[in-house]
Image (cartoon, coloured by chain):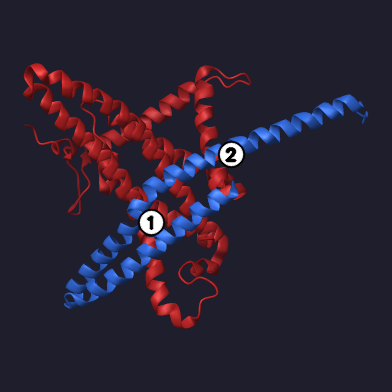
Chain colours: A red, B blue
């Protein structure tokens, strides 16, 4: 039986070295590039002819945009209007990355903690920047909420700092684990198809069901990641916990 | 500007009322689903992640200062506290979302 974890191995396509730092172009980078190109091309083609009465393509892209706008409206209220483009990009990147990873011979970069972690840490830094920009020094209240006695500071500040640092970690783990588990299951069941010979149709049917389920999970996980990013951003700019 | 006739004003009022009702219905179903899905996936990792972060920080700090395992033990205690705090905040937010409805 083939190792089900082999599908997650990083392969160097163009080895690059910068002062001893490995910045090679890998299969993960290629898939990210394909995802970005796919988003650009799809949206570009859909919005080629913009009209008051939308075509199917325009209606499709507008419905995704409306969905993100309503999501931001629900979590951030009127303050969120400025961040629609950021959240829209984030959602499309993760959703398309998850879905493209389901294709044969493709690579799911969202199952890698390094890739998703970098995105989450980048988002945490953005949260801090937006929070400081909006609230100034008041952002420091995140680490020591108002109304607490100063004697509590040595206990509360480390706890709140850990709580803040855990946000990108929890986002990363949730997405990476959910994506990897589905792909491992697909691979394991796929290897049973040949091993079970005449009864191979049983794992084949199970595999088909899991692929459908994975498609749902891919979109759901992108939705969860985006929603929670909105919630964290809302907490950072409004100061409400 | 020309004054609108009474029946047009009445129609306008009724359309606005209908739209408000429809929007309110939609927002309730959306947030119910959102709260449910969010809760399902959020709670599981919300407690674990600060503990793991604290464990990593403690491990690295212990290695750096050569104080194995004092900092790691202390930081795990703080990590557990942060985990409980995260769960409390998440539950509080879900409660607020449900009450909004």
Residue A35, how many percent across, how many down? 34, 32
Q: Is residue A205 above or below residue A99?
A: above
State which quadrant residue A54 falls in: top right
Q: In screen coordinates, is A119 left or right of A134?
A: left
Circle number at residue A194: none
Residue A24, how many percent across, how many down? 20, 43
Chain identifier of the residue bearing label 1 in the image: A
Residue B11, how many percent across, how many down? 82, 26
Nearest the viewer among B52 and A83 is B52
Binning the other alpha carbons within 10 Å of mark 1 as few (below 14), some (14 to 19) or many (20 upward) gives: many
Name, please, the residue furthest toward the bottom. Answer: A151
Circle number at residue A167: 1
Binning the other alpha carbons within 10 Å of mark 2 as few (below 14), some (14 to 19) or many (20 upward) gives: few
- Reading the image, the residue beneath label 2 is B27
State whether residue A47 appears in this view. Answer: no
Nearest the viewer among A53 and A146 is A146
State whether residue A230 appears in this view. Answer: yes
User: Residue sitting at 44 percent across and 79 percent down?
Assistant: A152
Q: In screen coordinates, is B35 left or right of B69?
A: right
Q: Which quadrant of the rendered structure holds the N terminus of chain A?
A: top left
User: Residue sitting at 22 percent across and 25 percent down?
Assistant: A206
User: Residue sitting at 25 percent across and 35 percent down?
Assistant: A182
C-alpha distance separating marks 2 and 1:
27 Å
Q: How many marks?
A: 2
Chain identifier of the residue bearing label 2 in the image: B
- The kind of secondary structure element at disc 1 is helix
User: Residue sitting at 15 percent across and 32 percent down?
Assistant: A188
Mark nearest the camera among 2 and 1 is 2
- The kind of secondary structure element at disc 2 is helix
């Amino acid at each position: 039986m083939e190792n089900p974890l082999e599908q997650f191995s990083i392969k160097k396509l163009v080895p690059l070295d910068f002062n001893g730092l490995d910045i090679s172009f890998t299969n993960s980078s290629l898939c990210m590039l394909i995802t970005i190109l796919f988003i650009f091309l799809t949206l570009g083609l859909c919005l080629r002819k913009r009209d008051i009465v939308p075509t199917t393509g325009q209606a499709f892209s507008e419905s995704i945009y409306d969905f993100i706008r309503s999501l931001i409206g629900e979590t951030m209220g009127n303050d969120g209007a400025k961040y629609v483009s950021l959240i829209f990009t984030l959602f499309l990147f993760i959703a398309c990355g998850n879905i493209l990873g389901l294709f044969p011979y493709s690579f799911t970069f969202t199952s890698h903690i390094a890739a998703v972690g970098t995105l989450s840490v980048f988002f945490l830094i953005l949260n801090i920047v937006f929070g400081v920009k909006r609230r100034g020094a008041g952002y420091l209240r995140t680490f020591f909420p108002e109304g607490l006695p100063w004697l509590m500071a040595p206990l509360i500040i480390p706890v709140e700092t850990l709580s803040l640092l855990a946000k990108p970690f929890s986002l990363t783990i949730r997405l990476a684990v959910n994506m990897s588990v589905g792909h491992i299951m697909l691979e394991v069941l796929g290897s049973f198809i040949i091993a079970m010979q005449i009864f191979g149709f049983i794992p084949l049917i199970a595999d088909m069901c899991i692929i459908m389920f994975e498609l749902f999970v891919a979109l759901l996980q992108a939705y969860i990641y985006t929603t929670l990013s909105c919630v964290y951003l809302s907490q950072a700019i409004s100061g409400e916990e | 500007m020309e004054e609108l006739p009474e029946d047009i004003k009445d129609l306008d009022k009724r359309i606005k009322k209908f739209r408000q009702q429809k929007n309110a219905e939609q927002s309730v179903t959306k947030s119910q689903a959102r709260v449910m899905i969010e809760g399902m996936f959020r709670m599981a990792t919300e407690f674990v992640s600060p503990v793991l972060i604290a464990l990593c920080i403690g491990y690295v700090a212990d290695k750096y200062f050569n104080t194995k395992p004092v900092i790691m033990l202390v930081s795990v205690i703080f990590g557990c506290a942060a985990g409980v705090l995260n769960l409390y905040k998440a539950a509080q937010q879900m409660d607020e979302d449900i009450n909004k409805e």
